[in-house]
Image (cartoon, coloured by chain):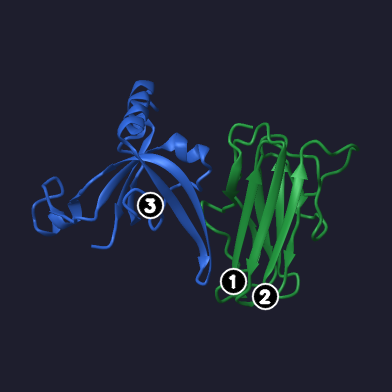
Chain colours: A blue, B green
Amino acid sequence: MIDESARAFWREAIERVGVPIVLSRAFGYAPNVTTFSVNLRAKVLLAAPDGSAASQQGLGAGGAGAVTETDRSVIVMAEELYRSRFPLPVQKGDLVTLPETTEQLTVTQVDPYLMAIAGAIKLTVAGVA
Amino acid sequence: MDNPGPFVFTTAGAAFSLASAGTFLGDWMLNFAGVDALSLQASFAYGGGGAVGGATIYFQTSLDQGQTPIDIFAPVFAEANGLSVANLSALDKAAPFSPAQQSLAANTIVDGVLGDRFRAVLVVSTPYTGNTTLALWGCAR
């Protein structure tokens, strides 16, 4: 169930501090690949703690772990994805491009539940370090 | 309509596979209420395998929320690259007709009937191999 206040808050937050992104999915097998892309606005956070690395070091999943500098967290409104007709659900391997910095990032994790009450989806994306 | 523009037809959120024979129902693409026109494109890139008439796509719409699919375009591909495009208008049909369900004649259209949703159904008679790829697009207006 979506809380309308939370959704309005996040919609406004993305409007204020979000940046344009291009979310893409490639279909087919090389060289016969076609790509579907949509232009969205999303909140992009910088480095995200690497939880799996923390676990590997015995710190526990809740502890602060290694940070890969090219990791990003991208928060998008589910309704915007739906409206743009992006084929849902967002999947590992989908591509996120940040036109302002020309970064090319790959979706490594999709968490549709963390911010579900606000109708937002959190993507963890990674670039090439 | 509220959200015109391009979209891709998928099955379970992914591209259609031609690697095995069978009938594969695509996802209903929703939220098209008020659509006036729809352009459809089937792009077939041949890799290997298959047969003449090996891949038939039935683009469908529905007027009863998906309970009764209606064929609106049926491109067919064989053993070569192919691109098939059709444009449909919601304002054209003048006479009653009996809709087809996965039986529309090859490379024909049914114009004038556009519901609030669309999907593609892929029928593969002979499996394709290699990097054979099928990309199904629509553009609503």
Nearer to us in this view, B25 or A90: A90
Q: Residue at x 60, y 43 (%)?
A: B5
- Foreground pick, A62 / B3: B3
Furthest-front residue in this view: A100
- Which amino acid type is marked by label 1? Thr
Chain letter of disc 3 in the image: A
For disc 2, the marked residue is B50
Ranked by sequence position, the earlier of labels 1 and 2 is 2
Residue A15 lies left or right of residue B70; in this view the side is left
Q: State the residue at coordinates (53%, 43%).
A: A85
Q: Amino acid at mark 3?
A: Val
Residue B123: image quadrant is: bottom right
C-alpha span from label 2 to label 3: 35 Å
Instruction: Nearest to the eye among marks 1 and 3: give it.
Output: 3
Check if mark 1's residue and mark 2's residue have beta carbons within 8 Å. Answer: yes
Using the rendered image, report if marks 2 and 3 lie on a common chain. no
Q: Which residue is mark 3?
A: A96
Q: Looking at the picture, which amino acid does disc 2 mark?
A: Gly
Pinpoint the chain carrying mark 2: B
Chain letter for mark 1, please.
Answer: B
Real-space CA distance between mark 1 and mark 2, rounded to the nearest whole angstrom: 9 Å
- Which disc, if any, is residue A20? none
Depth order, front residue of B96/A33? A33
Residue drawn 41% across and 55% down? A94
Q: Quadrant of residue B85?
A: bottom right
Q: Residue furthest right?
A: B95
Name the side, left or right, on which B78 lies relative to B5: right
Q: Position of residue A47 (x, y in %)?
A: 20, 49
In this view of the protein, can residue B27 be seen by the observer?
Answer: no
Q: Quadrant of the C terminus of chain B?
A: top right
Q: Position of residue B117 (x, y in %)?
A: 65, 40
Q: Mark 1 falls on what kind of element?
A: loop
